[in-house]
Amino acid sequence: MKHVSVIGSGTMGNGIAHVFAQNNFQVTLVDIHQAQLEKAIQTISKNLDRQLAKGSITADQKKETLDRISLEADIITGVKDAELVVEAVTENAEVKLKIFKQLDEAVSDHCILATNTSSISITKIASVTKRPRSVIGMHFMNPVPVMKLVEIINGYATSKETTSSIVELTKQIGKIPCVVNDYPGFVANRILMPMINEAVYTLYEGVAGVEEIDTVMRLGMAHPMGPLQLADFIGLDVCHSILEVLHSGFGNPKYAPCPLLTNMVTAGNLGVKSGEGFYVYKVGSKDLLISERFK
Ligand SMILES: NC(=O)c1ccc[n+]([C@@H]2O[C@H](COP(=O)([O-])OP(=O)(O)OC[C@H]3O[C@@H](n4cnc5c(N)ncnc54)[C@H](O)[C@@H]3O)[C@@H](O)[C@H]2O)c1
């Protein structure tokens, strides 16, 4: 494979484009919002500067990586040369199903269609295409240029050939593939989200405060950050919607989001992206300040 199209140039899409381009793929980055595309290329350039400062790439490699990325606002034009499409648009089933129908019509017969969804069924996404054997989950982790794992998710109909090409490709871009099957939350979020939800319950029930909960998990379990800080980083709305997928997918009340998490999302306290969650995030400040509400 030489040409990859990435649909959606937000947090994940720009990282995915960065990694493929850095590993010699021609990349077309597609987004419906021109401003997002411009922001994405600036982010990629800044992240490459960080790698340059660390000495992990040269100035020539930075330039070559940027030169391999083209930006496109029209999805049909953006995928015409693609041998692989990685979809990384907003986590909304309706939007993704519509895009996969369009992609199926627009790409060549041999093109593989991958989705970076955190929780939506790969089998369901594949079912709206005429190529369910060539549809697969490629769940990159955030931040993409840094995190090694790609959780590869086989839909019910994904062929062995599709899985083995994607496993090889994942290794080619310097990542470590881990193949799992398509059930709610796959592996990563099925295990991570109940832990985050339990941390929110521990706070809600007054067992301990924000700082104590995160400190126990950081120092006691050697997690790089506590579960409440991680939830803020992921986005509390994203955590809430993944818990809803687990709850409805398994029909098991143990996955129901904690009422405190629901309240915070309803109030618009979504974590880092809204400026406040369990902690407060001030532009230009690196201090981790606990939200007044939890003091
Ligand atoms: N953020 C994370 O930590 C994370 C981690 C792993 C997986 N994911 C998954 O990755 C996907 C993207 O998440 P994100 O955090 O990058 O979202 P984001 O909101 O940062 O970016 C989504 C982008 O999709 C674009 N978009 C929306 N509709 C589109 C369309 N019809 N055509 C083209 N572009 C469109 C938006 O303009 C936006 O730029 C989601 O499925 C999410 O679940 C996110």
Image (cartoon, helix red, strand yellow):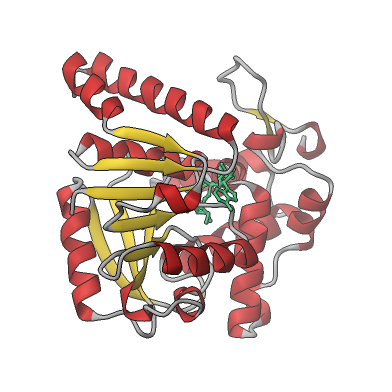
Residue 161 percent location from the top left of the image: 19, 76
Tell me which residue sits at (59%, 48%) in the image: 231
Q: Relative to 133, is 58 above or below? A: above
Image quarter (top left, top right, bottom left or bottom right) of the C terminus: top right
Residue 58 appears anywhere in the view: no
Horizontal side of residue 147 vs 263, given as left or right: left
Q: Nearer the viewer, residue 147 or 255?
A: 147
Residue 245 percent location from the top left of the image: 61, 72
Location of residue 164 by image quarter: bottom left
Location of residue 259 by image quarter: bottom right
Q: Nearer the viewer, residue 141 or 78?
A: 78
Q: Which of 13 and 151 is in front in this view?
A: 13
Horizontal side of residue 27 vs 186, given as left or right: left
Tell me which residue sits at (59%, 57%) in the image: 91
Residue 185 percent location from the top left of the image: 50, 70
Tell me which residue sits at (51%, 69%) in the image: 101
Residue 27 percent location from the top left of the image: 31, 41
Residue 150 appears anywhere in the view: yes
Number of labels in the image equals 0
Horizontal side of residue 80 vs 234, given as left or right: left
Image quarter (top left, top right, bottom left or bottom right) of the N terminus: bottom left
Horizontal side of residue 75 vs 162, given as left or right: right
Tell me which residue sits at (38%, 85%) in the image: 156
